[in-house]
Image (cartoon, rainbow, N blue to C red):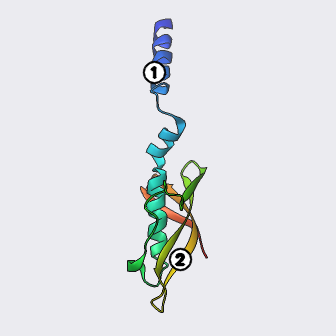
Amino acid sequence: MRGAIILVVAATLAACSDGETLAERTYRACGTPAQAFQAAKDFVRGKLKSPGTADFPGSLLSRDASHTDIDECTTMVTSHVDAQNGFGAMIRTEFTATVKYDRDTKKWALLGLHMD
């Protein structure tokens, strides 16, 4: 019996010490910040007059985009998009989108979107 308990404890410790950080485990379960950025861009495109003209910063690594992890599967993305307005003029719109990854459906949901 004692040997079985030691074996279970050793297996549990081995599973927890796989070198993966909490952030890495969260990203594996809930998507990466880059995936959250892509989801936010998709939701922003859906609100534009001319989504085909949308030009976003290349990645979250640019100085024009950032993210904040709100909780385990919720991320707030802040950036901008350059796109044509209803008159055809290119304008820059700042946005903050809060997106949540649903592990059951494996899809991103929009919790909030503010565009200036």
**Residue 17 at x, y percent in the picture:** 48, 24
Asked if residue 85 is positioned above or below residue 7 in the image, the reply reads below
- What's the residue type where badge 1 is placed? Ala
Asked if residue 33 is positioned above or below residue 83 in the image, the reply reads above
Residue positioned most to the bottom: 87
Q: What is the secondary structure assignment of the residue under circle 2?
A: strand
Q: Nearer the viewer, residue 6 or 115?
A: 115
The label number, if any, that marks residue 92 in the structure image: 2
Q: Residue at x 52, y 40 (%)?
A: 23
Q: Residue at x 42, y 55 (%)?
A: 106
Q: Nearer the viewer, residue 31 or 84?
A: 84
**Residue 88 at x, y percent in the picture:** 45, 89
Q: Nearer the viewer, residue 74 or 77?
A: 77
- What's the residue type where badge 2 is placed? Arg
- Quarter holding the C terminus? bottom right
Residue positioned most to the top: 2
The alpha-carbon separation of the residues under discs 2 and 1 comes to: 50 Å
The label number, if any, that marks residue 5 in the structure image: none
The residue where tag 1 is placed is: 14
Asked if residue 47 is positioned above or below residue 28 in the image, the reply reads below
